[in-house]
Image (cartoon, rainbow, N blue to C red):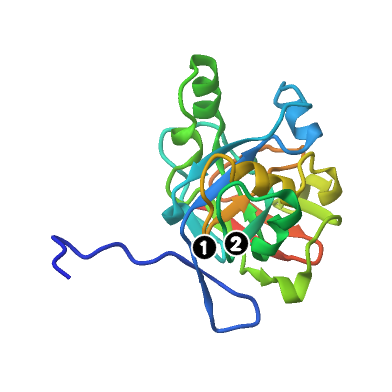
Amino acid sequence: MNYVFPPPVQVAIPIAGSQRLFPVRRVYCVGRNYADHAAEMGADTREPPFFFSKPADALVPGGGDVAYPAATDNLQHEVEMVVALASGGADIQPEQALDCVYGYSVGIDLTRRDLQQRAKEKGHPWDMGKGFDQSAPIADIQPLAAVGHPAHGSIWLKVNGQLRQNGDLEQMSWKVAEIIAKLSAYVALAPGDLVFTGTPAGVSTVRRGDLLEAGIAGVGELKVRIV
Ligand code: MN
C-alpha cells in the first residue's frame, strides 16, 4: 500500500478463554441508562436513551495503568456492561437485536466530569469530556456461549477497596435489545462495534494513585490504576 505513513494498528480486545481477538470498529456509549444515576446527575429519569462515542483507540484492553488525563480536576468512573457485536445493520428490530451480539464485557467510561458539565451548560459536544486518551478501559470479552445474555446480577466498582457503585443489571432503563435497536435507527451497526450500556449510581472523583476494581457478576472483572 502506498500510505504516506503507516496506518494505525487495529484495536483489538482479547477474548476470554481463547487466543483470538475481537477487532474493534466503533465504540458507542449510552447516556443515563440507570434511573438512580440519571437522578444523581440531576436529569429526567424517564428520558429516552441518547448516545455518544469514544474513539476505538481510547480503549485500554485488560485495564492496568491509566495516565491521569490532561485538562481536568474531576476525573470520574462509570462502570458499565459492554456489548460486543458480531453483526449489525440499520433499523434492527428489538426482536432480532440479540442475534447481533458476540459477547459481553466490563468497561469503565472514564469521564472528565468538569469538561462534560461545562459542555452541557453551553450546549457544546461531550467529546472532550468523554472521548479522551485511555478513557475506556475494558476487560476481556466473554463470548455468548460462556455467559449468555446477562440481564440481572451485580454491577459494582470499588476505589481503593471501598465500594462506590453497587447496582444490578436489571436496573437498566433500556435493555440490550432495545439499545441495539434504537442505536441502529441512527447509524448502521457493524461487526466489531462495542456499546457501553450506561452506569448505575455512585460515580465519584478519582486521583492519581487510586486503584479501581470493577466487576459484573458472571461477566468478569477489571482493575485500573490511575497513574
Ligand atoms: Mn457512561
Q: Is residue 226 shown above or below 31?
A: below
Q: Tell me if residue 166 comes above or below residue 14 in the rendering.
A: above
Locate residue 3 relative to residue 154 in the image: left or right: left
- What residue appears at the point 44 percent right and 43 percent down from the top-left corner? 132
Q: Is residue 197 visible?
A: no
Circle 1 is placed at which residue position? 192
Q: Residues within 10 Å of mark 1 (few under 14, many from 20)?
A: many
Residue type pointed to by label 2: Leu
Q: Position of residue 181 (x, y in %)?
A: 67, 47
Question: What residue do we see at 34% from left, 66% from top?
Answer: 9
Q: Quadrant of residue 100?
A: bottom right
What is the quadrant of the N terminus in the image?
bottom left
> Is residue 165 something that shows in the picture?
yes
- Residue depicted at x 49% and y 34%: 129
Kind of residue at disc 1 = Gly
Q: Position of residue 42 (x, y in %)?
A: 72, 21
Residue 90: x and y in percent read 56, 49
As drawn, 218 above or below 114:
below
Q: Tell me the element at label 1.
A: loop
Quick one: SS at disc 2? strand
Q: Which residue is mark 2?
A: 85
User: Alpha carbon of mark 1 to alpha carbon of mark 2: how far?
Assistant: 6 Å
